[in-house]
Image (cartoon, helix red, strand yellow):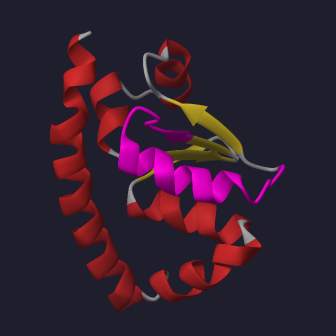
Amino acid sequence: MKVYFNNSCKICRAEINLYKKENIKEIDWIDITKNSLAQKETSRNDKELLRRLHVIEENKVIEGAEAFLYVWKKIPKYKFLYSFFKLPIVFTLFKFGYEIVAYFLYLKNKKQLKN
């Protein structure tokens, strides 16, 4: 599984670093910052990649809140998050909340697109 994240965002980097510490061999962590290969692999432009977390699993691109479910499901320490947030009502709320937070992080970090 490949996880595409924004390493230039302090909040994003801090969270992903927690997951990286678990040393899950099946996860390939890919920084999307100025990464044209990430754009090609995901078929997403730099703005789309910056806007949400993306995962490629079995040649399928998953983004946003659903991408977090894929990550949490692979990491034993965080599997409880997967179990909780996959519940239909909880996932709907999580997805809505994620989109709000992701939008403000995007606004905060979009200046990197101009470089």
Q: Is residue 60 at least partly visible in the picture? A: yes
Quadrant in the rendering for residue 2: top right
Q: Percent from the top left, x then y, of residue 49?
A: 38, 34
Q: Percent from the top left, x then y, of residue 82?
A: 57, 78
The answer to if 44 sits in the magenta stretch is no
Tell me: residue 61, above or below residue 100. above
Q: Nearer the viewer, residue 76 or 36?
A: 76
Residue at 48 percent of width and 45 percent of height: 13
Callout count: 0
Q: Percent from the top left, x then y, of residue 98?
A: 29, 64
The answer to if 5 sits in the magenta stretch is yes
Return the residue found at the far right.
Answer: 25
Residue at 46 percent of width and 82 percent of height: 85
Tell me: residue 38, above or below residue 99. above
25 vs 63, left or right, is right
Residue at 29 percent of width and 41 percent of height: 51
Tell me: residue 80, above or below residue 105. below
Q: Is residue 53 at least partly visible in the picture? A: no
41 vs 34, left or right, is right
Q: Nearer the viewer, residue 42 or 34?
A: 34
38 vs 96, left or right, is right
Tell me: residue 100, above or below residue 41. below
Residue at 30 percent of width and 79 percent of height: 92
Q: Nearer the viewer, residue 71 or 40?
A: 71
| Magenta residues (range) | 4-25
Placement of the C terminus among the 4 image quadrants: top left
